[in-house]
Image (tube, rainbow, N blue to C red):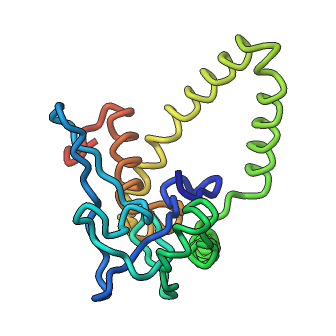
């Protein structure tokens, strides 16, 4: 599990590594033996050079959106072995990812204040109700789903009509281009319109 910021779930941050030649290694594949299933991992500590794995020499921040931190910190495997991987200092990578997220949040389109207050109040109220009145929470969720089904496709149609470029849409939503495109496709299907066909 990496670092996450509420409202920006597609921007999960992790510790990335670099090899001595400055390249980023591919995920390490683990053969689990008797099955056809292979496990992949990009966790920084798997690049320790054992069992013919690549040996990482530096750490940096990394984000699921493709961002990579500019600052690198030397990786001391003797120190990792001494203190353990959970206690090893990776704070520089996390700090750089936090700065990246501040930039993402600053470029994202903010919700109008009244809408933000309504959503925050609703979330708090549902949190209060869920233990004692789960049926009422479910009914509220159904009502919210109906609102989304009404307005999501309508908004997607306006966005498509205005020809908002995908990079700009992703930036405004504070998400990745892939996730922004998936949202538009989801709402197109929700409205019964197939992407690429006239509405």
Q: How many marks?
A: 0
In the image, residue 138 above or below residue 84:
above
At horizontal 78% and vertical 30% (from top left) the residue drawn is 127
| Quadrant that contains the C terminus | top left
Rendered residue at 59%/56% (across/down): 4
Is residue 168 placed above or below 122 in the rendered structure? below
Residue 17: % across, % down: 41, 74
x and y, in percent, of residue 71 in the image: 52, 87
Q: Position of residue 9 (x, y in %)?
A: 54, 53
Is 184 in front, or is 35? 35
Query: Closest to the observer: 54 or 11?
Result: 54
- Which percent across, then down, holds residue 66? 39, 70
Closer-to-camera residue (191/23):
23
Q: Residue at x 62, y 53 (%)?
A: 7
In the depicted structure, whether residue 12 falls above or below residue 148: below
Find residue 125 and report its image quarter.
top right
Q: Is residue 132 above or below residue 173?
A: above
């Amino acid at each position: 599990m990496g670092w996450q910021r509420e409202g920006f779930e597609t921007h999960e941050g992790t510790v990335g590594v670099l090899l001595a030649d400055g390249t980023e290694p591919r995920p390490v594949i683990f053969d689990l033996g008797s099955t056809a299933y292979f496990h992949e991992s990009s966790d920084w500590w798997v690049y320790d050079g054992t069992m013919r794995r690549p040996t990482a020499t530096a750490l940096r921040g990394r984000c699921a959106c493709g961002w990579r931190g500019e600052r690198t910190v030397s990786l001391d495997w003797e120190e990792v072995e001494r203190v353990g991987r959970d206690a090893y200092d990776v704070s520089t990578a996390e700090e750089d990812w936090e700065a990246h997220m501040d930039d993402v949040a600053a470029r994202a389109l903010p919700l109008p204040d009244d809408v933000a207050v309504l959503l925050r109040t609703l979330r708090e109220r549902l949190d209060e109700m869920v233990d004692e009145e789960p049926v009422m929470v479910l009914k509220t969720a159904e009502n919210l789903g109906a609102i989304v089904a009404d307005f999501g496709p309508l908004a997607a149609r306006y966005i498509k009509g205005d020809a908002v470029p995908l990079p700009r849409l992703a930036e405004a939503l504070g998400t990745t281009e892939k996730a922004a495109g998936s949202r538009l496709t989801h709402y197109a299907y929700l409205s019964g319109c197939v992407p690429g066909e006239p509405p």
